Each structure stands twice: as C-alpha cells, then as structure tokens.
Amino acid sequence: MYSLVVATATAAMAMSTALAVDPRDFEADLNLPGFHFVPYPFDWQNDPNGPLYDPVHDKYHLFYQYQTPRLWGHAVSDDLVSWVQMPVAITTDQWYDQGGVFSGSGTVLDDEEQSVILTISSSDNTEIFVATPKDRSDPFLTEWELPDSNPIYTTSARDPTEIMKTSDGRYRIADGTADGTAIWECMGCETAEDIISGGKWEEIGMYQTKPDGQGYWECPDTFPLLGENAIDGTWVSKFSMSGDRYYLGTYNETSGEFSPYDLEDRMYDSNSKFYASKTFLDTRDEPRRVLWGWLVCGNPGESEWTGLQSAPRVVEAAADGKSIVMAPIPELKTLRSDDDKAHYENLSGNGDDVKELDFSGRMFDVEATIGGDGASQSCGFRVLWDGADEFTDVSIPEGTKSVRMLVDSSVIELFADGVATTTFGLRTKAGSVKFGLLGDCVFEGIDAWAMSPYEYDASNVL
C-alpha cells in the first residue's frame, strides 16, 4: 500500500540539505510499522530514554538504547508524530561508559537558560553521569558533551530518573536498585553547574523499598499524577520487573519517602513485553504526562530492525483516582484517512465464529462502543493479516464499554476503557489487513480509519 524506497547514500547526502529522505520500504518488509518509531539505520532498539519537550525551540526529543554495545540514539519531532532522525547522541568514548551507555532520563530545568541535562547510567550499575547540549541555540540539540566532572556520583544502581525539584528548591534523582527505588539529593545545589559538577550528590534513603522476594527494580519513574480525577498529592512509583508496574501513593518531600495506597502493584500494560517505559512532562499546552514504552517484539520475520517504541500515550488518573488510564496521544489522529473510513452500527458477533468486516488497510485505527453491560467474557477482535490463514486474536476485557485499537503492521495496541494491552502478530504474505468481531457482544458503533505512516526524515544519517 505504501512504498518508500531507500535512496542511495550518495544521492541522499546530496539532497539532505534540501529534501527529506524516508528510508522505509513497506513492501520489502511486511512487518515494518508505519507510526511506531523505528530508528534508522535499522538495528537493535530497546529502552526509551530522556524524552523531553524543549520549550526554547518548541521541539520534542526522544533518546533510546541503540545498537550493541548500547549507545543513545536520538530523534526530534515537532508534534510527537513525525520524526527527524538525528545522529547518535551519546557514544562509548569515556572510561565509565565502555560497556555501553545504559538507561536514563532527560530534564529541562526551570533556570533562566532552561538548561537541558541527560542523566545516564553505566553498564555495570556503578556510575551515574550526565550529558548536556554542546550548543543550546541549536534547535535540534544535535551534539552532546560529557562534562569533565563525570560521573556525578557512584552507586550500586542504574536507570536514573529525571531531576526532580522539591517545593523548597532541592534537586533529587531516583535510581533503580536491588532493594527498590533509591533517592539521591544534590547537597547545596542551586544551579545547573552545581548539578553537573559532581561530588555534591548524597543518597538520602529509599523512595520505595520493594516487597520481599521481588527481583531488581529497574527503570524507575516518579512523578505527580495528573488528570481531572487525580487525588491531590498523589504520586506514581513505577518500576520495571516482569513488565511495567506501578503504585499510587503520597510522597513526603522532607524524608524523600513514597507511601503506597495499596499493597499490590498494578501493570501499565497487561503484556509484560511492554517494558522499561519512561514519561515526561509535556508543557507545550495544558500540562500532561506522556509515556513511551519499549515493545519487546524481537525482529519479526527476520527484519533488519529489532524492538519498537510504543505509540506515545497520555497517562492520567482513572475515574476513581486510584489507578491509571492511558490513551494514545490525540496527535496520532492526524494520520487517519478521512477518505478511507468505515462506520458500522449495531453489529453482533457470531459467537465462536469470526464476523469479518469489509474494511482493510496496512495500518489502521479503530474506535468502538459496546452496548449492554459491556464486553462479554468472549468478546474481542480478530486481526486478519492475510485472510483466514494468518491472524491474531485480541481479547477485550469483560465489562469494557469503550475500546480503541491501533493496528500497525505487526503490532497491536488495545485500550479498553483506558486499560492497555499490547499484542504482536507476524505477516508473511503481502495483502491488506482486515479485522473481525469475536464473541457475542453487541457493538453499538464502530469507526475504522486507514492510517498513513508518519513523515520520517533520515537525511541526517544517510
């Protein structure tokens, strides 16, 4: 349906200053997603790192674990939908990152310069170090440098969070450890220079101690929960261990301790292959928390790429204020095709048999409402990759009233009343992708749109 053929490297470099070059060839790679981020050159990709909104240049940045040994890849966007591929941001050229540049976060400080600092961990869970833009006036923040003061502290931890600022002006970072999420404070720090100078950071205790018997808490994320249903003072304590898990509770700034409301953790996504997620505070308009997650999908069909970033999701409080709901960012709707849309009303499933609909597309977006008491136990969608021969069944949780499904070549993201489930498929034959209904529930309304791939400019790396 879409064919964007790779230009030669020579031609690409000649055009790079004047013409965007999209290297994706969807006909050659049937499983290549069109609106889930895959870096170029195609290679290994895992944890999202350092996502941030830069208010100085009004641009979004995404960093991610890339290649082996791990580096930090980098991409820039004006809208969180279409992307400009940037050169690798952080490489292994220092004594503390020889084993790979592992996971971390990004922070835009509230100082006059709105300084940008990336917090990063070494491969041996020992050093925490930082990177800063070489030229803050560059809209794309193309080049990054590692201050001579690195590492800013040494510890038995990894995956530092963004730099948090308390109400009385103290700077803190949380890390993942074998005991839970630890918290560090920059003693007497007032400026960006203080933060990156090293020697001022001290561990002040545990943000949250893990329950007995659990494994390593990695990729922590700590932030106040937003949304009209959020209970005042509610914070999130997220960690990665057999999937992405979280608690809601309160945060004591004085002690640095988090106190969960409930004893049991919940999952961001019911599939444990949604992993190592990272949020950032998007302040372009009304503040919102935007989340990225690593989709652990291997290299479908022996593709040249391995691993995906999820579609960006808005994270906010559920109606009861005691759990989290998610939805794809509204900007993704700009990829919908109004000329290739289908609408259905009052459709019932066929029980054990699939009720195939007459809509198709390489990638598509579906919104549906379910009548009565919501989805029955057997309710779901069947995504048909090639007629009846290749398909993936997606269950809709019982009682669901409203559902959204993103289908993008080999990946499916389902949002059932805001509860997320990621599923993977595998295409081996060319042809249109369709979907059908499973179970006996009644769909009051279904809208389906074909989706276009996002615009992707890789001329900087060709």
Image (cartoon, rainbow, N blue to C red):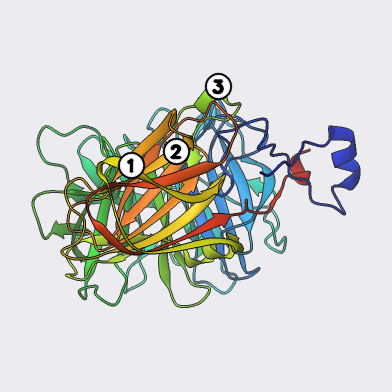
The reply to whether discs 3 and 1 touch (Cβ–Cβ < 8 Å) is no
Determine if residue 424 is in view.
yes
Q: Amino acid at mark 2?
A: Leu
Please identify the quarter of the rendering in which residue 403 is found: bottom left
Question: Residue 53 in the image: x percent, y percent?
Answer: 54, 64
Residue 244 in the figure: left or right of residue 344: left
Callout 1 touching callout 2 (CB < 8 Å): yes
Q: Which residue is mark 3?
A: 302
Q: At 72% from the left edge and 60% from the top edge, which residue is drawn?
A: 138
| Label 3: which secondary element | helix
Quadrant holding the C terminus: top right
Work out whether mark 1 precedes mark 2 in sequence or the reverse, and give the earlier one.
Answer: 1
Query: Which residue type does callout 1 highlight?
Result: Val
Residue of label 2? 384
Mark 1 closeness class: few <14, some 14–19, many ≥20 residues within 10 Å: some
Q: Looking at the image, is mark 3 or mark 1 earlier in the sequence?
A: 3
Residue that label 1 marks? 354
Label 2, label 3: how far apart the Cα atoms are: 20 Å
Spatial separation of the CA atoms under disc 3 and disc 1: 30 Å
Q: Position of residue 251 (x, y in %)?
A: 21, 64
- Of residues 344 and 94, the one nearer the viewer is 344
The local crowd at label 3, few if under 14, some if 14 to 19, many if 20 or more residues have their Cα within 10 Å, is few
